[in-house]
Amino acid sequence: MRKTPFYDLHVSHGARMIEFGGWEMPVYYRGIIEEHRKVREKVGLFDLSHMGEIEVKGPGALEFIQKMTTNDASRLNVGQVQYSVMCYPDGGAVDDILVCRMADRFYLVVNASNAAKDLDWLRTHAGADVTVTDLSDETALLAIQGPESAAVLARLSDVHLDGLYYYHFAEGKVAGVDCIVSRTGYTGEDGFELFFHPRHARHMWDALLEAGRTFDIEPVGLGARDTLRLEMGYALYGHELDPSTNPLEAGLGWVVAMDKGEFIGRDALAAAKERGLSRRLTGFKLLERGVPRAHCEITKDGTVIGEATSASLSPSLGVGIGMCYLTPDAAKPGTRFDVIIRGKGVAAEAVRPPFVKPRVRKAK
């Protein structure tokens, strides 16, 4: 398995390490519930260096991004970030990604398990007027997330954070290190993702923990990252998205710009929209005690109607929550069904995510 530049630091902090997307990553340090609550209430520090970073540059860069992604990148100003999906010709998802518009290039952030596949997919379709460069090995990525994240980062950065809104980024220094500071995250809380060279890994880690000591900052593992994103209803590739799933079914129609012109998968998505979707991603909340997990069957009147794509106990709500694909009728909020947990049906109802109100810093 591959290791991030922070591996030794995770071990020294007592992290329990697991395999994730071919990387050895911390699942928790003190405990998933404690770390989850730390991010919701104060601030936590995540190592996301397993993610992939890809640069797209050249005179045809915008046209290429428009062809390869579902969202409309022409709407981006320099310094803006856009959530988007890359699709296969049949509409299935290659990956969900972030597209950052820089002055002379695009900077893509892709999922760890898909980084090699995404790079190959992009290079296969790139013309002579576009250069696609893998920057993953020369990029470390830390996320600082939670209501106190801006206060912590302000102690270290020369970036004007008050003027940096959700899904925007700036280039500047953090703890004296050149960084891309992006007001993005996967938690539903205010927070930042910091991209910098791996040679500064230990310095950056130590500086953030020291600056956050007043706010009781602590490292957070993948376990809490998963429960935090689940409470927001955010899709995770390999669970809510995969090659057999299109973004319309996944509730991501808002990132599919049918009116921007041709892109890979457009015809298939237009046809799916025209005939009507046979299933939709919905959230569910248990009405009885229980802890649901991914792949639990969903039944109604004794008939299996789906299975959970992601599910867990919500640390914020104290009840079991999850997501699943159901027919449009069954996915309507308030619809009752059972979630099979350890062979027993537990009553649940469909709900529209997010389960917990997000607190990101949007522009006024």
Image (tube, grey):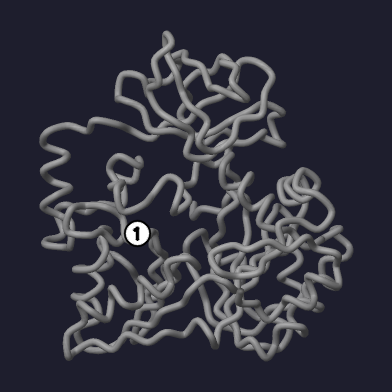
Q: Position of residue 219 (x, y in %)?
A: 77, 62
- Residue 190 position by quadrant: bottom right
| Point 35% across, 40% down: residue | 251
- Residue 348 position by quadrant: top right
| Point 58% across, 30% down: residue | 321
- Residue 97 position by quadrant: bottom left
Q: Is residue 156 above or below residue 47?
A: below
Q: Is residue 329 left or right of residue 283?
A: left
Residue situated furthest right in the rendering = 214
Q: Is residue 335 above or below residue 164?
A: above
Residue situated furthest top in the rendering = 301
Q: Is residue 92 left or right of residue 220?
A: left
Q: What amino acid type is highlighted by mark number 1? A: Ser
Q: Position of residue 8 (x, y in %)?
A: 78, 78
Question: Is residue 248 among the parts visible in the rendering?
Answer: yes
| Point 41% across, 68% down: residue | 80
Q: Position of residue 356 (x, y in %)?
A: 60, 35
Q: Is residue 36 above or below residue 93?
A: above
Residue situated furthest front in the rendering = 343
Image quarter (top left, top right, bottom left or bottom right) of the N terminus: bottom right
Q: Position of residue 142 (x, y in %)?
A: 65, 71
Helix, strand or loop status at disc 1? strand
Mark 1 Cα-neighbour bin, 10 Å: few <14, some 14–19, many ≥20 = many
| Point 68% across, 64% down: residue | 46
The residue singled out by tag 1 in the image is 84
Q: Is residue 335 left or right of residue 224?
A: left
